[in-house]
Image (cartoon, helix red, strand yellow):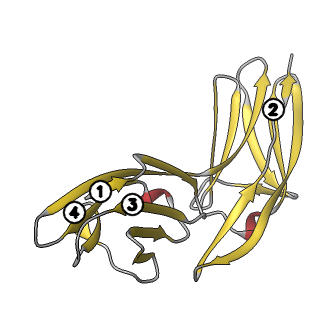
Amino acid sequence: MIVDKPDTLSVTAGDMAALEVKVCGTPELVPKWFKDGMELATGRKYKISFSQMISSLNVLSTEKLDSGEYTFQVMNQVGKDLSKINLTVLGGCLLSMVKGSAPLTLKWFRGTKEILPGKDYSFFLKDNQVTLELHNVNRSHAGEYTCQIINDAGKESCAVNLTVKGQFVRKQAVGSHMSASHYSHRSFS
């Protein structure tokens, strides 16, 4: 009964995740979607549709906790078929490579305001790679971000401008896209 489906799907936090499964069979086909054993229904978080033998589950404005295994089930009078799809929601992040003598102190700024880890941001320094992770990305996250590294020899910084593309509407689903690229290498003596 299930003809085609993805095994995995990855999206950036804030984007819509579109899971689609193509089915075949004789009417009346009854499609259902589940996450963690709970049946999903159309509402603020999900939009479910079934048209032309394709069942769609749109996870609107994804968050990290939307990651996981989604189960699609289709039934008719003859029987039922199941399919599992793994969804991974990635946080938006900015990366920078650094090199210097320990101890290194890391600070991130948005404009001139220092960013503190919390519900909107997390950051870390590992293997000479500095990462700023943005959670639940939306237009308010747009702007200039500066990474500052400090040690006994002094401080260095580099900046990147983050653009969050405006909201879009597609099949009544609202989400947002983020685009940024940044890679640099700094040496500290």
Please state which of the two labelled residues, at mark 1 or mark 2, is closer to the viewer: 1
Q: CA distance from mark 3 to mark 4?
A: 18 Å
Placement of 14 over or under 10, stated as above or below: below
Single out the residue that lies furthest toward the front: 26
Q: Is residue 22 above or below residue 153?
A: below
Q: Position of residue 145 (x, y in %)?
A: 82, 51
Please tell me how crowded label 4 is: few (under 14), some (14-19), or many (20+) other residues with Cα within 10 Å: few
SS under mark 2: strand
In this view, the residue in front, 15 or 49, is 49
The residue beneath circle 1 is: 2
Q: Amino acid at mark 4?
A: Gly
Residue pointed to by mark 3 = 21
Label 2, residues with CA under 10 Å away: few <14, some 14-19, many ≥20: some
Q: What whole-number distance in Å separates the C-alpha atoms at marks 1 and 2?
A: 56 Å
Residue that mark 2 sits on: 150
**Residue wearing tag 4:** 37
| Residue 142 seen in the figure | yes
